[in-house]
Image (cartoon, grey):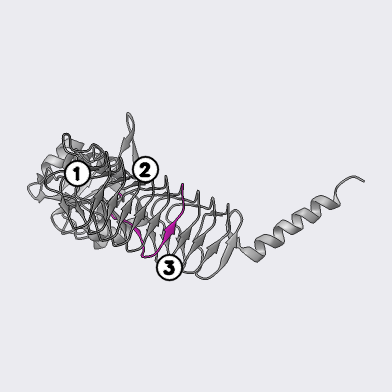
């Protein structure tokens, strides 16, 4: 289900061919053709998916996928409509098969040789492109937008009106709304950090999602926003991101949020509307922060935070509780000092 503007699909492949390449045990007919890969919840009959652990057995039981990579103990949860491919490590097997479908997925950073502006690029009125910028094939740049010196706009990227891409910034696998500002040196749409452990070491999982920056988003200098692994990384309308922020793959950030410098977001985080994260806040993967929450600088968020609260400390907890604990420790330390 990768976007064809950014990724070239080399399928389809027969299930028997996929099973053979993995050394998988085939539980069902092998002549069905598989056109693409997809997550369990979004897969269609022409897709191959995977189930890594029993945590996802409900999604597995409901999937519409035509074939699913599973461990031996999970094969009985595969619906009758799907073919089970039994493997030792479904995540590692998926990484190999995703690379079979998309062998060039890791090479998206190389601009098209010989063209500063590719002839297939669509450039609307009143665009300014400064010296040394590269506009790759299939891109679309909206009216009155400006591309800074040395910036690279990768294949298929589309942006709306009045956007500004700063000097030396790179934008790949992304859709930008209107009035988006990307400051100098920012990196948008590079690989997410995803690996599977294999017999010979770590194997990169092809990152086949996109980055979506909605209207009026601002991205600070040298900030990085990774594209999704299979889903998208999304930054909501009007959100402002400071310099030196890291946003991991599959993260969804709501509207009108503020992320101060050196915030670090792991993958698959959900942040509601109007959230404020102070400087150096770190958020663990798969955490949800509710709308309107505020997190004090240098806090560490390791679990979900309800909407509307103010939080601080490590692990992040309600700010009043955190301040009482700090004060109590200070009093305890002072009381034990020698005269």
Q: Is residue 77 left or right of residue 21?
A: right
Q: Which residue is mark 1?
A: 136
Query: Horizontal and vertical percent for residue 143?
Result: 22, 59
Q: Nearer the viewer, mark 2 or mark 1?
A: 1
Q: Nearer the viewer, mark 3 or mark 1?
A: 1
Q: Which residue is mark 2?
A: 193
Toward the bottom, the furthest residue is: 308
Residue at the (60%, 53%) spot, across then down? 314
Residue at the (38%, 54%) spot, across then down? 268
| Magenta-span inclusion, residue 117 | no
Crowd rating for badge 1 (residues with CA inside 10 Å; few <14, some 14–19, many 20+): many
- Which sits earlier in the primary sequence, circle 2 or circle 3? 2
- Which sits earlier in the primary sequence, circle 3 or circle 1? 1
| Magenta-span inclusion, residue 230 | yes
Circle 2: element type: loop
Residue 273 image label? 3
The answer for how far apart the CA atoms under marks 3 and 1 are is: 34 Å
Q: Main secondary structure of the magenta part?
A: loop
Magenta residues (range): 229-244
Q: Is residue 245 left or right of residue 30?
A: right
Crowd rating for badge 2 (residues with CA inside 10 Å; few <14, some 14–19, many 20+): some
The answer for how far apart the CA atoms under marks 2 and 3 are is: 25 Å
């Amino acid at each position: 289900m990768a976007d064809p503007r950014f990724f070239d699909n080399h399928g389809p492949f027969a299930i028997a061919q996929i099973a053979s390449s993995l050394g998988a045990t085939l539980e069902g007919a092998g002549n069905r053709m598989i056109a693409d890969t997809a997550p369990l919840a979004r897969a269609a009959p022409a897709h191959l998916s995977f189930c890594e652990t029993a945590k996802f057995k409900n999604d597995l039981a409901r999937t519409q996928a035509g074939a699913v990579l599973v461990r031996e103990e999970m094969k009985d949860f595969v619906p009758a409509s799907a073919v089970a491919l039994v493997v030792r490590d479904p995540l590692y097997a998926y990484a190999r098969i995703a690379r079979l479908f998309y062998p060039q997925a890791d090479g998206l950073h190389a601009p098209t040789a010989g063209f500063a502006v590719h002839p297939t690029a669509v450039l609307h009125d009143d665009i300014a492109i400064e010296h040394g910028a590269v506009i790759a094939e299939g891109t679309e740049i909206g009216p009155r937008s400006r591309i800074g010196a040395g910036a690279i706009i990768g294949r298929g990227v589309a942006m709306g009106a009045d956007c500004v891409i700063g000097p030396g910034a790179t934008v790949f696998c992304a859709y930008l709304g209107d009035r988006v500002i990307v400051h100098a040196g920012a990196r948008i749409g590079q690989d997410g950090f995803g690996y599977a452990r294999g017999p010979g070491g770590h194997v990169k999982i092809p990152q086949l999602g996109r980055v979506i920056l909605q209207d009026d988003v601002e991205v600070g200098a040298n900030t990085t926003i990774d594209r999704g692994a299979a889903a998208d990384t999304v930054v909501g309308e009007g959100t402002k991101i400071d310099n030196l922020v890291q946003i991991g793959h599959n993260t969804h950030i709501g509207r009108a949020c503020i992320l101060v410098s050196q915030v670090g977001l792991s993958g698959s985080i959900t942040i509601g509307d109007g959230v404020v994260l102070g400087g150096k806040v770190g958020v663990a993967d798969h955490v949800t922060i509710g709308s309107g929450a505020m997190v004090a600088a240098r806090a560490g968020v390791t679990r979900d935070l309800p909407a509307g609260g103010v939080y601080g400390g490590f692990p992040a907890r309600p700010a009043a509780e955190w301040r009482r604990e700090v004060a109590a420790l200070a009093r305890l330390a002072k009381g034990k000092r020698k005269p």
